[in-house]
Image (cartoon, grey):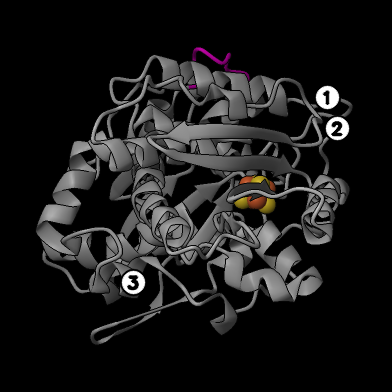
Amino acid sequence: GQCITHCPVGALRERDDTDKVWAAIDNPKKITVAQVAPAVRAAWGEALGLSREEATIGKIMDSLKRMGVDYVFDTTFSADLTIMEEGNEFLTRLSEGQLKDRPMFTSCCPGWIRFIKSQYPHLVPQLSSAKSPQQMFGAVMKTYFAKSINVNPEDIYTISVMPCVAKKGECNMELFYEEYAGHDVDTVLSTRELTRMIRSAHIDPTTLEDIQCDELMKEGSGAGVIFGATGGVMEAALRSAYYLVTGTNPDADAFSVVRAKKFGEEHVEAEVTIKDATVRAAVVSGLANTRKLIDAIERGDVHYDFVEVMACPGGCVGGGGQPIHDGEELAFERGKNLYFLDKNADIRFSHENPDILKLYADYFEKPLSHKSHTLLHTDHNAWDMPKQN
Ligand code: SF4
């Protein structure tokens, strides 16, 4: 079972940041803008007695608004943005022959970033330079979104609700842009902290209604939703990489081979053909499994082009910030919920998210542009995860 002392990223003591968020909500000078990660929707209801069907993302949005948050968004939007940046980065590195010896690794899990930096520092250049969806969204909220509502970035207070305790350290990553110097994300709440806030605000969960996210960054694709489960980032990236190379969409489920078949699998690997190229992909979760896989890569026993790593077994659905149930491992069940949501989503490709297309047309111009590099990518050597969360 998942419990605090088993937290795979070593955050033994939990920090409570709910007071900071209440203070920001009460501060008339601050405009509070929240995002909620994909994996949160698969677990928050467990702590409040809601069934999986009842515990929708729209009700989380309603709870945040009732608590006084000004604008609410779904991190699925910036998961799509991550795919646009990371998918293009992968294809560039592949075509330039940079992945002949070693793969590109995903960069959206701070537990993994801390692990690679301390255990395999020579592999840090193989990390994608893309920031995680949490950080990308924070940067977009303080620039593109702030402009759209005519306020200065200093007046925007960004909150994220995450399944993760390591995300509390990741948000120390800095944002420098034009005259603004600060952070992408001001405060990270875990799923458990969100449910504590709902309780302390005396909101009866059975009265929550489905409300939509706010305009401008409203949409998220099914590909973005599955970021919360192991294999989801890889599958989403392959869907869009296929489109980028061939100009047509694959079947949305064409790459479902990278999904976990059962809980606790060592890793999943797949060879995927895109036009005349073969992409060798691997997906791993849990740091013990990760170490085994990396050691095999380093010995030359296996070769991959692209590897997804998540520190928590089963991916973010099993994160250390999710509700705790003694003796139960719910990650796999929660992951199935995300695949169900993807299957039933109107949009299943990150590159078809209309709000992402508008963001590029009106602001970033194209993936990997100068502005994208400034706001959406990071130099992994320029910041460190704090030792204690
Ligand atoms: Fe956080 Fe775990 Fe997800 Fe990594 S896998 S981002 S440590 S919840």
The amino acid at mark 3 is His
Distance (Cα) linking label 3 and label 2: 40 Å
Q: Which residue is mark 2?
A: 1
Task: Name the residue carrying label 1.
Answer: 328
Does residue 278 show up? yes
Cα gap from disc 3 to disc 1, whole angstroms: 42 Å
Q: Is residue 68 above or below residue 159?
A: above
Which residue: 83% across, 41% down?
A: 3
Percent across and percent down for residue 21 are 47, 59
Question: Where does residue 338 sit, x and y in percent of width and height?
Answer: 52, 24
Q: Quadrant of residue 105?
A: bottom right
Q: x, y (%) of residue 345?
A: 35, 20
Q: How far across and how far down the image is residue 247, in percent?
A: 23, 36
Q: What is the span of residues highlighted in magenta in the rendered image?
A: 49-55
Instruction: Check disc 1 and give the amino acid type.
Output: Glu
Q: Residue furthest front?
A: 276
Q: Secondary structure at mark 1?
A: loop
